[in-house]
C-alpha cells in the first residue's frame, strides 16, 4: 500500500500535473461559459472543451514540451491521467442527471424504445464500419457514440476496453477521432431535423421523441426539442438512451475481452469490468430518492460537466492530428450512414407509438 501511494504521488505531485490541470480547468470553464451562446449551445461544453484542448496543444508543445524530453513526457502523462481518471468521476457524477422516478413514469414507453435503438444502432454502425475496414476499437467507439450519448458514451465505453501499454496512444487517438466524428455528425443531423421536422407532419411530441431517439449529444436533443416545443419529452427520451450506457459498457467489456483483447493472460481471463458505471447508477438512485441530494443534483451535474470538460481538454492536448486524418474518413462515413438510418427509424417509431 505504501509503495502504491508513493507511486501515485510521484505521478500526481509534478509541475506538469499542476500546469495541465490549470490549462484543462480553464478550458472547461471557458467551454461552460461559451455553451450559453447561440451556435455554441449546439455543440455543448464537452465538445468545446475538446476543441480548446486540441488548439492549446500547439502553444504547450512550442513553449513548454519542446524544452526537454522530461517536459514532453510529463505533459503527456499528466494529460493522460486527467483524461482517464476525471472522465470516470465525471460520468459517475452525471448519474445525478438521471431522475429514475421521471424515467420510469413519464418515460416508461421510452425505455424499451431506447434499448432497441441503442442495440440496433451499435450493431449496424459497427458492422458497416468493419465492412469499410475500420479497426475494431475505433468502430465500436463510433458505434457507441452514435447509438447512445455522444462524447460521454465514447469515453465511457473506452473504459471497457483494455489495451497493452504500447497501444495506449492509439487508443487515445481513437477516442478523440470518435468524439470528433460524433460531434460533427450530431450537429449536422440536429440542424437537419430542426429544418425538416415541421415538414414531416409529425406532432410536437413525435418530433421530440424523434430528436431524443436519434440525435447524438444531449445538447443536440435539447436544442432540437426546444425548437419543436417538446424539450421535456426529447430530454426524457435522450436520457433513456443515456441509461443504456451502463448495460452497453458491461456487454462490450465482455465482448471485447472475448474477441479482441490483446492483454497477455496466464490462462485465466479477467474481464475489464467498468466499475465506475456502478457509481453512475448509484448516483442516479441517490439523486432520485435522497431529497436533499436531489435538491442539489443540478449543481452536481454542473460540476460533472466541469470535470468531464477537463477530461476532454486533456484528451485534446494529446491528440495526434495525422492519425485522425489517416483513419477517420471511413469511420465518419459509417456513422453518417447509420445516422440516416437511425433518424428514419426514430421517426417511424415515434409515429407508431406516440
Image: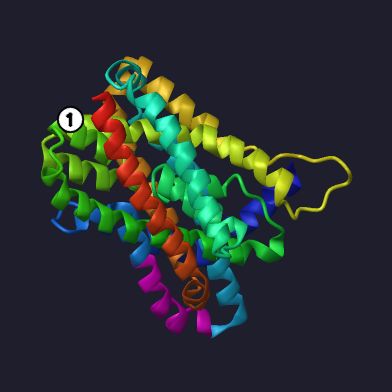
Along the line of sight, the residue nearer the viewer: 137 or 7:
137
Q: Secondary structure at mark 1?
A: helix
Q: Residues within 10 Å of mark 1 (few under 14, many from 20)?
A: many
Residue 24 sits inside the magenta stretch: no
Quarter occupied by the C terminus: top left
Q: Which residues are magenta?
A: 52-66
Quarter occupied by the N terminus: top right
Residue 290 seen anywhere in this rendered image of the structure: yes
Residue 168 image offset from top left, x and y in percent: 63, 62
Residue 169 image offset from top left, x and y in percent: 60, 66
Along the line of sight, the residue nearer the viewer: 162 or 255:
255
Number of numbered tags placed on the structure image: 1
In the image, what residue occupies the spot 60% across and 41% down?
252
Q: Is residue 71 above or below residue 119?
A: below
Can you identify the residue that label 1 sits on? 205
Along the line of sight, the residue nearer the viewer: 341 or 301:
341
Amino acid at each position: 500500500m505504501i509503495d502504491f501511494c508513493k507511486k501515485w504521488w510521484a505521478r500526481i505531485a509534478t509541475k506538469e500535473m499542476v500546469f495541465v490541470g490549470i490549462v484543462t480547468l480553464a478550458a472547461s470553464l471557458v467551454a461552460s461559459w461559451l455553451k450559453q451562446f447561440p451556435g455554441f449551445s449546439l455543440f455543448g461544453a464537452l465538445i468545446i472543451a475538446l476543441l480548446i484542448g486540441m488548439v492549446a496543444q500547439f502553444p504547450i508543445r512550442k513553449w513548454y514540451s519542446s524544452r526537454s524530453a522530461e517536459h514532453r513526457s510529463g505533459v503527456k502523462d499528466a494529460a493522460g491521467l486527467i483524461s482517464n481518471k476525471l472522465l470516470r468521476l465525471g460520468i459517475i457524477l452525471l448519474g445525478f442527471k438521471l431522475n429514475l422516478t421521471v424515467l420510469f413514469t413519464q418515460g416508461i414507453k421510452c425505455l424499451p424504445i431506447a434499448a432497441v435503438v441503442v442495440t440496433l444502432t451499435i450493431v449496424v454502425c459497427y458492422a458497416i464500419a468493419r465492412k469499410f475496414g475500420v479497426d475494431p476499437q475505433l468502430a465500436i467507439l463510433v458505434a457507441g457514440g452514435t447509438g447512445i450519448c455522444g462524447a460521454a458514451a465514447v469515453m465511457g465505453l473506452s473504459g471497457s476496453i483494455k489495451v497493452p501499454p504500447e497501444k495506449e496512444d492509439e487508443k487515445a487517438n481513437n477516442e478523440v477521432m470518435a468524439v470528433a466524428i460524433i460531434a460533427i455528425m450530431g450537429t449536422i443531423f440536429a440542424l437537419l431535423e430542426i429544418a425538416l421536422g415541421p415538414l414531416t407532419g409529425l406532432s410536437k411530441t413525435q418530433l421530440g421523441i424523434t430528436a431524443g431517439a436519434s440525435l447524438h449529444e444531449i445538447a443536440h436533443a435539447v436544442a432540437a426539442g426546444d425548437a419543436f416545443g417538446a424539450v421535456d419529452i426529447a430530454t426524457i427520451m435522450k436520457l433513456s438512451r443515456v441509461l443504456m450506457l451502463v448495460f452497453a459498457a458491461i456487454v462490450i467489456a465482455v465482448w471485447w475481452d472475448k474477441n479482441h483483447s490483446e492483454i497477455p493472460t496466464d490462462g485465466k481471463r479477467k474481464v475489464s469490468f467498468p466499475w465506475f458505471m456502478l457509481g453512475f447508477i448509484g448516483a442516479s438512485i441517490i439523486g432520485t430518492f435522497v431529497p436533499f441530494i436531489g435538491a442539489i443534483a443540478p449543481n452536481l451535474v454542473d460540476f460533472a460537466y466541469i470535470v468531464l470538460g477537463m477530461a476532454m481538454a486533456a484528451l485534446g492536448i494529446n491528440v495526434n492530428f495525422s492519425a485522425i486524418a489517416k483513419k477517420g474518413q471511413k469511420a465518419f462515413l459509417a456513422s453518417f450512414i447509420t445516422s440516416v438510418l437511425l433518424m428514419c427509424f426514430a421517426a417511424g417509431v415515434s409515429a407508431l407509438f406516440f
